[in-house]
Image (spheres, helix red, strand yellow):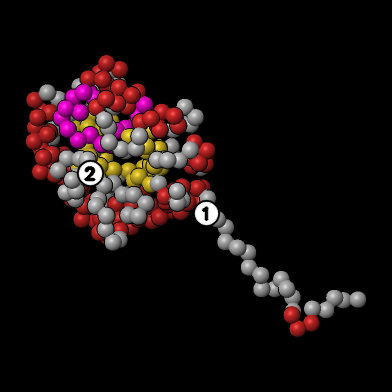
Amino acid sequence: MALAFGSFGDPFADSVAPPETPTVRSRLGQIREAVDRVCLTTGRDPNSVRLLGVTKTLTPDQIRPALEAGLEDLGENYIQEAREKATRLPGARWHLVGHLQRNKVNLAVDLFETIHTLDSVSLIRRLDRRCTERGRNLPCLLQIRLGGEETKHGIDPDQVFSLLEELRGEPPRSLRLVGLMTIPPPGPDAEASRPHFRRLRELLVTILERDYPFWHGRELSMGMSDDYLVAVEEGATMIRLGRAIFGER
């Protein structure tokens, strides 16, 4: 005897599977696809853009899926957090994307692949001495404060060339200046960051034109979860993504 559903019909006919919860792997895939599209549109090689997963406040267990999905570079704001995580996440390349305190220079040289946040001659000289002692050629970026925010670390654009001229007299021996980093001031949307990203790129072009013998690269570390595609359009070579990869914290 057939089962009759009467006026209610098939109870499964209109059922819809709930949407899958995004995973770290799926988010990374979407980010890479979006970056590839922008690079194709702007005539760039997608391999010229490196993704950094920013891991502030995350545990190693929360970070590990990103490494398993192919992410190689991790950015950390605090040296102590990076030390603890690095012991449990071997193989990752760690970048310091937070302020470097002078009393943490020795630890930073031993731990990080790249430091993004240099902002004074005295810090550069101290870091360079430690690099020489440790036999390291450490890539570093100058942090540029484009929004004029007093609460942020960084060098004001009008001070960059006086800093570089001071270094010309006694160039770094082991520390390698390879580019610029910035954090734009908060804005209503991603487009609000574009003038700051463009200005950083133009500043790098001017530095390269002046041919400083101790300048060794064209890196632009700019763009975070809300504005990274605009940053790629403006020439970013490293984008620093936390929420876009790992979800809300």
> In terms of secondary structure, where does tag 1 sit?
loop
For disc 2, the neighbor class at 10 Å (few under 14, some 14 to 19, many from 20) is: some
Against 144, residue 231 (above or below) is below
Q: Nearer the viewer, residue 81 or 184?
A: 81
Q: Which residue corresponds to mark 1? A: 22
Instruction: Look at 33% across and 24% down and name the residue there.
Output: 107
Q: Position of residue 219 (x, y in %)?
A: 26, 40
> Looking at the image, is mark 1 or mark 2 nearer the viewer?
2
Does 225 appear in magenta? no
Against 213, residue 48 (above or below) is below
Instruction: Look at 43% across and 37% down and name the residue there.
Output: 72
Residue type beneath disc 1: Pro
Q: Position of residue 205 (x, y in %)?
A: 17, 44
Q: Position of residue 50 (x, y in %)?
A: 36, 42
Q: Which residues are magenta?
A: 111-128
> In terms of secondary structure, where does tag 2 sit?
loop
- The N terminus sits in image quarter: bottom right
How many badges with numbers are in the image?
2
Which one is earlier in the sequence, the residue at label 1 or at label 2?
A: 1
Instruction: Look at 50% across and 47% down and name the residue there.
Output: 24
Q: Is residue 24 left or right of residue 237?
A: right
Q: Quadrant of residue 229?
A: bottom left
Q: Quadrant of residue 132?
A: top left
Q: Nearer the viewer, residue 184 or 34?
A: 184
Q: Which residue corresponds to mark 2? A: 152
Residue type beneath disc 2: Lys
The furthest residue to the right? 1
Q: Quadrant of residue 37?
A: bottom left
Against 11, residue 132 (above or below) is above
For disc 1, the neighbor class at 10 Å (few under 14, some 14 to 19, many from 20) is: few
Instruction: Look at 12% across and 33% down and name the residue there.
Output: 164
